[in-house]
Image (tube, rainbow, N blue to C red):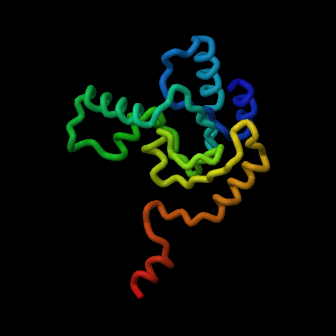
Amino acid sequence: MTANSANCTGKACSCATSGGWSGWDPKIQQKVLDAIELTRNNDRLVLNVAFNYGGRDEIVCAIQKIIRDGIPAEDVTDELVNKYLFTAGVPDPDLIIRTSGELRVSNFLIWQAAYSEWYITPTYWPDFDKEEYRHALEAFAHRDRRYGKVSSGELQESNA
């Protein structure tokens, strides 16, 4: 992450992590925290590395914190839950790239991926290179981002 944070510094990329810190070597924790601090003001792209992360665990931890904070059930909203997630303050992903051809979510960003676009590639992670990344971005550029709404074409067809 140290090398990546150096690459991110002048490129408007910020570093973030999702997941728990338990089991991390304190030296590695400090390097990660340094990278996050070094890039915290960059706002074009977020390099979010998931360590000890599970989407269900994240939601359970958020609910536990909400309850501990004494927040009444009727005050719980999407926005409030977002503030209690491991990814608080990090935008939801626009694009999730799933390598190795797997067609499952695998407990990854369950809450945040609600309106994300997915790019599935048979390429394994170690072989995922700039060319494959370019293919993912090209596919994403052709998507119709509707955020849960129907497209105007679908709406016209249903009214016909």
Residue 36: percent from left, percent from top:
60, 27
Query: Looking at the picture, does residue 2 appear above or below residue 82?
Result: above
Quadrant of the rendering where the C terminus is positioned: bottom left
Residue 49 is situated, as x and y percent measured from the top left of the image, at: 59, 32
The residue at the point 62 percent across, 32 percent down is: 15
Q: Residue at x 67, y 39 (%)?
A: 13
Q: Give the residue drawn at x 74%, y 52%.
A: 134
Which quadrant, please, contains the N terminus?
Answer: top right
On the image, the x and y values in percent for residue 81 come to 35, 40
- 26 lies left or right of 19: right
Instruction: Judge from the rendering whether residue 150 lies leftward or rightward of residue 126; answer left or right.
Output: left
Front-most of 10 and 139?
139
Q: Nearer the viewer, residue 62 or 121?
A: 121
Determine the residue positioned at 47% across, 60% down.
147
Numbered circles on residues, count: 0
Q: Residue furthest top?
A: 26
Q: Nearer the viewer, residue 89 or 96?
A: 96
Measured as percent of width and height from the top left, residue 108 is found at: 50, 40
